[in-house]
């Protein structure tokens, strides 16, 4: 007989438990003190928000080292790299069209308008009130102004200010310089360079480990924030979250269940039944583990053994392209940012929405593969979108209450994208012969 261990249970189980206990505490005590008058739900909520801030702090250097580690350990020919980028860009463009169409036609964020503003004001007493319909300062239609805004004055500034776009550009520049130096010093002793590459890998894996520890604290953060929100706003907060859940799942499922199988059939000559049937192990594993990176060996086996895709095409998509095949994360990040912008009355033009999409793309490329990647990156995208800090620290824990469900759909979408890219690459490779 196996004993139930809460610490060994899946994260989503612990989050659900946190939601249940937090809601119960909020209903029972409201805003009243308990614990000998030294503790209340507001105190728990403030403690929970510390976890979100820590996630945001650790995510920034992780983006840098994730991109850098991929660049120094990847060997790509121009032809294969061009095809990979083209196919990834095509899939991503479709995801963006789906997301923007849903958000601009249905405008689901309006269901939160006024309610979320009031909730934010209540939870952050004394903070600056959120204006009715301001335009974020960092969303500019001037391309030159946008480019200048991404260039830091020092190498440390992007990390201090959490400037994600500047960090990604810095990582790309550093990675390109290391690769160039490695080629130029091919005939010399490269022990120092190998040490640098090993150090980059160590830093990357250390940050992942730190983030995994922080992720374990998420259920406690959810417990505290739900207790605070329910204590102040009542159980009707879950009705608001349901609107967000339905919106995100609609976008993800349209992309995964309509576009992917159609492209596999028409572009890759892969029957829809075979695409889902032979790839079921990878899709189910991704949904279960909530990690496309952990699913990688199973994805490769499904492609090469079940679908007959060449090993080179499979490895190019699943291993090298893993940081690019992130339609699930990018679609979610962009839709979530636009949803919350609508919720507080930000009237964004299409050009401004595309700037948010660009930020979601850059963050998604840098933070893929690990569990809760979308949740870790979300505060960065929301900040890039110019949303008020009070909104970010209130909305993210609310979203976290149902993120375990959305996260598994994101991971499933990412793995389905890995498989589709491999199928399309294999078809192009066969056409060459």
Image (cartoon, helix red, strand yellow):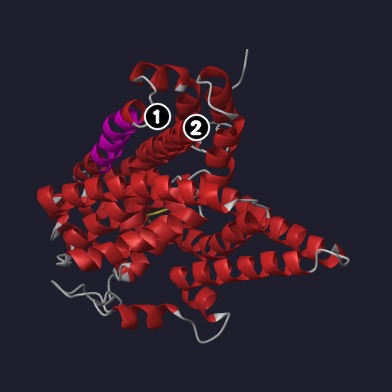
Majority SS type along the magenta span: helix
Residue 256 included in the magenta stretch of the image: yes
Residue at image point 45% right, 37% down? 421
Helix or strand or loop: what does disc 2 sit on? helix
Q: Position of residue 303 (x, y in %)?
A: 53, 26
**At which x and y percent is residue 343?**
18, 59
Answer with the quarter of the image where residue 163 lies. bottom left
Asked if the magenta segment contains residue 28, the reply would be no
Marks 2,1: beta carbons within 8 A = yes
Image height check: is 313 above or below 140? above
The answer to whether residue 342 is left or right of residue 23 is left
Q: Is residue 3 left or right of residue 288?
A: right
Mark identifier at residue 268:
1
Q: Is residue 264 above or below residue 113?
A: above
Give, as a single range, the part of the protein colored magenta.
Answer: 248-263
Residue 66 at x, y percent in the picture: 59, 57
Residue lying furthest right: 189
In three-dimensional space, the C-alpha distance between marks 2 and 1, rounded to whole angstroms, equals: 8 Å
Tell me the residue that label 2 is attached to: 426
Q: Quadrant of the N terminus?
A: top right
Instruction: Kindly give the residue lying farthest to the top in the view shown.
Output: 1
Q: Earlier in the sequence, mark 2 or mark 1?
A: 1
The front one of 42 and 294 is: 294
- Residue shown at 49%/82% (left/top)? 152
Instruction: Report if residue 4 is visible in the image.
Output: no
């Amino acid at each position: 007989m196996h004993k139930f261990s809460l610490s060994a249970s899946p994260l989503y189980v612990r989050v659900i438990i946190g939601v249940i206990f937090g809601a119960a505490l909020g209903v029972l005590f409201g805003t009243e003190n308990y614990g000998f008058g030294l503790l209340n739900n507001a105190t728990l909520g403030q403690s929970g928000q510390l976890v979100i801030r820590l996630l945001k702090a650790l995510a920034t250097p992780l983006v840098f080292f994730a991109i850098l580690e991929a660049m120094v350990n990847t060997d790509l020919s121009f032809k294969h790299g061009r095809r990979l980028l083209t196919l990834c860009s095509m899939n991503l463009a479709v995801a963006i069209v789906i997301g923007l169409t849903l958000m601009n036609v249905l405008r689901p964020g309006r269901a939160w308008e006024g309610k979320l503003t009031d909730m934010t004001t209540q939870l952050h007493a004394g903070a600056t009130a959120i204006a009715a319909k301001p335009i974020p300062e960092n969303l500019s239609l001037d391309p030159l102004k946008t480019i200048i805004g991404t260039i830091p004055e020092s190498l440390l500034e992007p990390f201090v200010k959490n400037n994600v776009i500047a960090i990604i550009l810095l990582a790309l520049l550093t990675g390109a310089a290391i690769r160039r130096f490695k080629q130029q010093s091919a005939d010399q002793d490269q022990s120092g360079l190998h040490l640098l590459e090993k150090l980059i890998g160590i830093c990357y894996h250390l940050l992942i480990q730190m983030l995994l520890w922080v992720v374990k604290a998420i259920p406690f953060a959810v417990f505290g924030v739900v207790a605070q929100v329910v204590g102040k706003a009542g159980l009707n907060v879950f009705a608001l979250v349901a609107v967000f859940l339905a919106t995100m799942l609609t976008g993800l499922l349209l992309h995964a269940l309509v576009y992917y199988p159609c492209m596999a059939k028409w572009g890759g000559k892969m029957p829809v039944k075979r695409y889902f049937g032979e790839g079921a192990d990878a899709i189910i594993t991704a949904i279960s583990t909530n990690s496309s990176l952990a699913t990688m060996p199973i994805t490769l086996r499904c492609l090469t053994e079940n679908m007959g895709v060449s090993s080179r095409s499979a490895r190019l998509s699943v291993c090298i392209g893993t940081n690019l095949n992130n339609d699930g994360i990018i679609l979610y990040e962009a839709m979530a940012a636009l949803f919350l912008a609508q919720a507080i009355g930000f009237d964004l033009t299409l050009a401004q929405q595309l700037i948010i999409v660009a930020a979601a793309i850059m963050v998604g490329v840098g933070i893929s593969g690990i569990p809760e990647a979308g949740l870790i990156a979300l505060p960065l995208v929301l900040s890039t979108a110019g949303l008020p800090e009070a909104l970010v620290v209130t909305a993210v824990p609310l979203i976290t209450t149902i993120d375990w469900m959305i996260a598994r759909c994101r991971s499933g979408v990412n793995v389905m994208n890995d498989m589709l890219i491999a199928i399309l690459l294999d078809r192009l490779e066969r056409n060459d012969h």
